[in-house]
Structures are given as C-alpha cells and as structure tokens.
Amino acid sequence: MIMYQTTIGMYSIEGKNYTSFGIRCDAVSIEDISPDKRAVDSLVALCNSEELEPIHLYDIVEDFLTSNQIPLQTV
C-alpha cells in the first residue's frame, strides 16, 4: 500500500525565509506546495484515502493549487 506523508522545508525568496509543506510517497516527492500545513495535510489524507497511484500525484497537486479549495474530505 502506498502511503503519502507531509514534508516540511525552509525556503527563501528574495532574501525572505519561509516554511512550506510538501507531499511525498516512496516514489515521488513534491516540495514547497503551500505554507498552509492544514491544507497539505488534507491533501495527503485525500491521497491516502483514495489510494492514489504516484503517477497521478503531479496532476492532483496541480489541481489542488489551481482550485483555491482545501480538500477536506473525499467525495
């Protein structure tokens, strides 16, 4: 079974540091998705509950970033 996890990292833009969260599983890692841990944790929970195949992760993250919605639960 594939398990997704939230990652944390420190980043810098134009000399300003910030903390951001990402998502990873065994095969794929996408960093710096959002500074909103709750939103990324919700995305991780959705990926785990739907048993998302890693090949689809980039598309799911893109949809997440462009939807302006936090996925709180599966439909």
Image: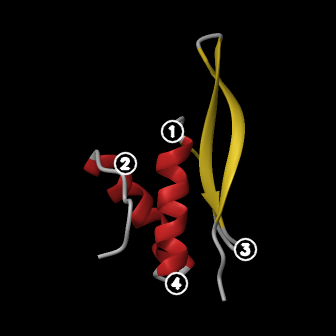
Q: Is residue 74 left or right of residue 45?
A: left
| Amino acid type of the residue that numbered disc 4 sits on in the rendered structure | Glu
Q: Tell whether label 4 touches label 3 (CB within 8 Å).
A: no
| Amino acid type of the residue that numbered disc 3 sits on in the rendered structure | Asp
Residue 30 visible to the viewer: no
Please name which of the two marks, 2 or 1, marks the residue nearer to the observer. Answer: 1
Q: Earlier in the sequence, mark 2 or mark 4?
A: 4
Mark 2–mark 4 Cα distance, whole angstroms, equals 20 Å
Few, some or many residues within 10 Å of mark 3 (<14, 14–19, 20+): few
- Give the quadrant of the N terminus: bottom right
| Amino acid type of the residue that numbered disc 1 sits on in the rendered structure | Asp
Which one is nearer the viewer's eye here, 61 or 46? 46
Mark 3–mark 1 Cα distance, whole angstroms, equals 23 Å
Q: Earlier in the sequence, mark 2 or mark 1?
A: 1
- Give the quadrant of the C terminus: bottom left
Q: Secondary structure at mark 1?
A: loop
- The residue wearing badge 3 is 26
Q: Is residue 58 above or below residue 21?
A: below
- The residue wearing badge 1 is 36
Q: Tell me the tag on residue 51.
A: 4
